[in-house]
Image (cartoon, rainbow, N blue to C red):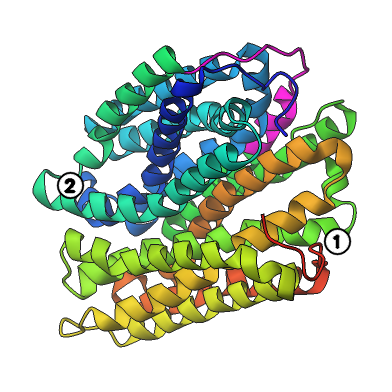
């Protein structure tokens, strides 16, 4: 049931159109997490990025999106959900255009960060409006099925679109393409989406700011270490800022009545274990996509379109397994299904590491397709069980915060993982010699998540329950 004040009135004939607008908005945000991946080699050459610097094109978006989504859900309830969605999409579109016109690498990174701000402001309102405009039963089930399909298919759409746009029009169009889609979503929202009631609440600005500073400082430290070394003043200073910010975060969360990251989540491993697993899973996925893109284009000689096609099986496997998982949960339980999915992630990434170790100009596309399928199948079996356990084990008074934290950890995990792995790549000998070793290190993230989830998750679905 949506939060208080989220129920809105829509004429019956307009519900389908309104749902379509919300699904389009969600698809735009999901596509943006993957569309740049295929263009990364071209962006690196055009902007003169090092391997470490290139990772910021991905992590800048994830950091601001993941850091602010903890706070922006409450902002939406204060100013109205439609208003928050329109504001966020407007910022997203402007930042996308700025990124397309970028004349330097760090201008592009800044534009990506602002994109993340827009996405974070708008994204929480999409689900609230979707739930508020539909009634329980077939109507809501159809709307949710479409929403889930868009979320799952977004990665494949982004990979394919990124390949086609990069190869035909140039890498800048992976940014420009957001403009017409965003304008269409804006016009549709203004004409067809209703506004929700505003609510009074207190914002934990201090906690949100401290969490963002801590994450940015950690990512900067790990990424800079790849170029400057672990003992450089900037790296050591960044680690110090991160530690201080984490201390400030704990102090803020202990004092604020509505913390963005309630400390109760981490008071026992039963609740902390699945949360930490959710942080680690995207670290493995993002690392896989980032380094596989470099592998296919720089070592195997694939075109951007071929790279997009090579990674599509990953998303198809994810969508297929994601549809089957709800039917298997009543029989096997969350811990069994989630652990099997995490095992698939570990094996898929390790398999790609072996491919990278033996890669050469004559390597065909087949060795890339097979681990991509395994990784997608594993991912599809992972997210639903882990999310279900997180939501079930969260304290009742913090259900809303748990949903935002779950979404934020997915974005932050990808950013943190990629930052650490760029340092591993540098230590392993760079792109010429260290890609296989780095992909093998990538598998350590879901492997650790497997240990955490396998030990601390508890079954929550009663055997024999009919899936919704």
Instruction: Return the residue nearer the eye: 29 or 226.
Output: 29
Residue 254 left/right relative to 43? right
Point out the stretch of residues depicted in magenta.
Answer: 193-212
Q: Tell me the residue that label 1 is attached to.
A: 270
Residue occupying the point 76% across, 64% down: 465
Question: What secondary structure do most residues of the magenta stretch adopt?
Answer: loop
Q: Is residue 433 magenta?
A: no
x then y, percent, for residue 46:
18, 47
x then y, percent, for residue 327:
63, 67
On residue 420, which mark appears? none
**Local SS, label 1:** helix
x then y, percent, for residue 13:
45, 22
Instruction: Return the residue nearer the eye: 85 or 412.
Output: 85
x then y, percent, for residue 169:
11, 43
Q: Tell me the residue that label 2 is attached to.
A: 165
Residue occupying the point 81% across, 67% down: 459
Please, is residue 199 above or below residue 248 in the view? Answer: above
Please, is residue 91 above or below residue 36 in the view? Answer: above
Residue occupying the point 48% across, 26% down: 15
Mark 1 or mark 2, earlier in chain: 2
């Amino acid at each position: 049931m949506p939060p208080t004040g989220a129920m809105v009135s829509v004429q019956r004939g307009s519900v389908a159109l309104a749902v379509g607008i919300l699904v389009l908005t969600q698809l735009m945000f999901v596509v943006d997490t993957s569309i740049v991946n295929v263009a990364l080699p071209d962006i690196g050459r055009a902007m003169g990025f090092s391997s470490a610097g290139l990772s910021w094109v991905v992590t800048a978006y994830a950091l601001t999106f993941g850091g602010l989504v903890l706070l922006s859900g409450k902002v939406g309830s204060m100013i109205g959900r439609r208003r928050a969605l329109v504001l966020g999409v407007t910022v997203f579109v402007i930042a996308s255009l700025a990124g397309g016109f970028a004349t330097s690498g760090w201008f592009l990174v800044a534009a990506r960060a602002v994109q993340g701000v827009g996405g974070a402001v708008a994204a929480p309102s999409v689900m609230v409006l979707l739930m508020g405009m539909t009634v329980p039963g077939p109507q809501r089930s159809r709307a949710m099925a479409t929403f889930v399909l868009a979320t799952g298919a977004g990665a494949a759409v982004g990979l394919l679109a990124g390949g086609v746009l990069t190869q035909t029009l140039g890498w800048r169009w992976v940014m420009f393409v957001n403009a017409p889609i965003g304008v269409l979503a804006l016009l549709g929202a203004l004409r067809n989406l209703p506004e929700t009631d505003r609510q009074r609440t207190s914002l934990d600005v201090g906690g949100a700011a401290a969490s963002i500073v801590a994450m940015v400082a950690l990512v900067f430290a790990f990424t800079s270490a790849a170029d400057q070394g672990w003992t450089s003043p900037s790296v050591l200073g960044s680690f110090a800022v991160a530690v201080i910010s984490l201390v400030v975060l704990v102090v803020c969360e202990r004092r604020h009545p509505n913390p963005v990251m309630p400390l109760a989540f981490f008071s026992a491993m039963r609740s902390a274990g699945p949360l930490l697993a959710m942080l680690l899973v995207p670290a493995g996925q993002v690392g896989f996509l980032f380094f596989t893109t470099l592998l296919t284009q720089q070592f195997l000689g694939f075109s951007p379109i071929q790279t997009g096609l090579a990674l599509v099986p990953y998303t198809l496997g994810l969508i297929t397994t994601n549809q089957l998982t709800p039917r298997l949960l009543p029989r096997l339980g969350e811990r069994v299904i989630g652990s099997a999915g995490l095992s698939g992630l570990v094996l898929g990434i390790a398999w790609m590491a072996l491919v990278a170790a033996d890669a050469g100009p004559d390597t065909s596309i087949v060795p890339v397709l097979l681990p991509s399928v395994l990784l997608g199948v594993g991912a599809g079996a992972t997210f639903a069980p882990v999310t279900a356990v997180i939501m079930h084990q969260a304290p009742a008074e913090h259900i809303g915060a748990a949903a935002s934290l779950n979404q934020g950890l997915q974005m932050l995990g990808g950013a943190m993982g990629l930052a650490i792995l760029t340092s591993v790549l540098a230590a392993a000998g760079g792109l010429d010699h260290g890609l296989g070793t780095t992909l093998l290190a990538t598998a350590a993230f879901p492997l650790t998540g497997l240990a955490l989830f396998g030990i601390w998750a508890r079954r929550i679905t009663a055997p024999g329950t009919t899936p919704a």
